[in-house]
Amino acid sequence: MAGSNRALFGRRKTKPLSPRRQRLMDDIFPALRLDPLHRSPDNRSQLFPVTICGLVLEIGFGAGEHLTTAANEDRDTGFIGVEPFVNGMARAVSEVDRLGLRNVRLFDGEAGSLMDWLPAGSVDRIELLYPDPWPKRRHHKRRFVSPENLDRAARLLAAGGSFVLATDIASYAEWSLIRFRRHPSFSWTARQADDWRQPFTDWTRTRYETKARAAARRSVYLRFERV
């Protein structure tokens, strides 16, 4: 997961890609990849080859199972996925190709640079699902939830849009909740305990969440509205 200071932390690649996935990364990924070095688009409709009625940004999508499932089930909505881990990106590209998804765009760099590039008010929902908690205190500056990144999110989200966060690390949930509640552009939507104990509507469980449940770790689901 990218930190808030434009540096990339953590692994980029573990094992070599299979020949098929390497071909997909060479042949398919360039057409799916957004490039913040290019001129910023005037509006979100320029990001996709098909007409979209909404836009979701998922930051750190892992292997892409949540992203591609949602994009396949709602092809009228555009989905942008950010993931610097090459093996996870290759899995997502493979699934995008298999399903023939034209409403997906991908980015393999630091999330902040893409957020700065996208048009203001163009995103309806930002998703941060099981981010790296960077548990050591000296690494807390690498956590994605920070005043700088919340400013970016506030600029990107349309009024009434939402930022959703899922984590199985209680200290990260507390960290995030404190920072969101300090930010003037976000309002926590929970009204009762089940609002943060139960998964979001139309939720697709990620592989990491499955592992967390198998290890008896309870997840927290936080939703914040852009006011």
Image (cartoon, rainbow, N blue to C red):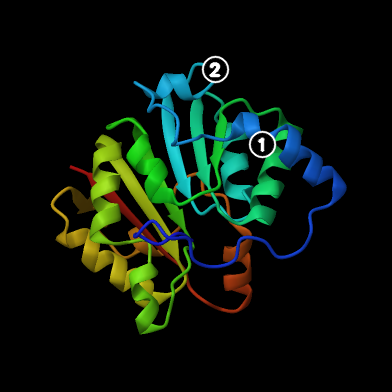
Q: Position of residue 101 (x, y in %)?
A: 65, 29
Question: Is residue 174 rendered to the left or right of residue 71?
Answer: left
Give the residue displayed 67% in from the left and 61% down from the top.
13
Give the label on residue 29, or none: 1
Quarter location, residue 222: bottom left
Question: Is residue 27 rendered to the left or right of residue 217?
Answer: right
Question: Is residue 33 rendered to the left or right of residue 36?
Answer: right
Which of these two is toward me, 113 or 223?
Answer: 113
Give the residue displayed 57% in from the left and 72% down from the top.
212
Which of these two is toward me, 187 or 63?
Answer: 63
Per the image, label 2 sits on a secondary structure element best described as: loop
- How far is the residue under mark 1 from the one under mark 2? 17 Å
Q: Position of residue 4 (x, y in %)?
A: 35, 59
Q: Position of residue 199 (x, y in %)?
A: 46, 56
Q: Residues within 10 Å of mark 2 (few under 14, many from 20)?
A: some
Per the image, label 1 sits on a secondary structure element best described as: helix
Q: Is residue 224 above or below residue 38?
A: below
Q: Is residue 222 above or below residue 57?
A: below
- Inspect the image, locate mark 1, and give the three-letter code of the amino acid beneath it: Phe
Q: Is residue 16 above or below residue 120?
A: below
Camera-near label (1 vs 2) is 1
Q: Is residue 16 above or below residue 101?
A: below
Give the label on residue 50, or none: 2
Give the label on residue 144, or none: none
Q: Position of residue 225 (x, y in %)?
A: 25, 46
Quarter location, residue 136: bottom left
Give the residue displayed 79% in from the left and 45% down from the top.
21
Q: Residues within 10 Å of mark 1 (few under 14, many from 20)?
A: many
Q: Is residue 103 visible?
A: yes
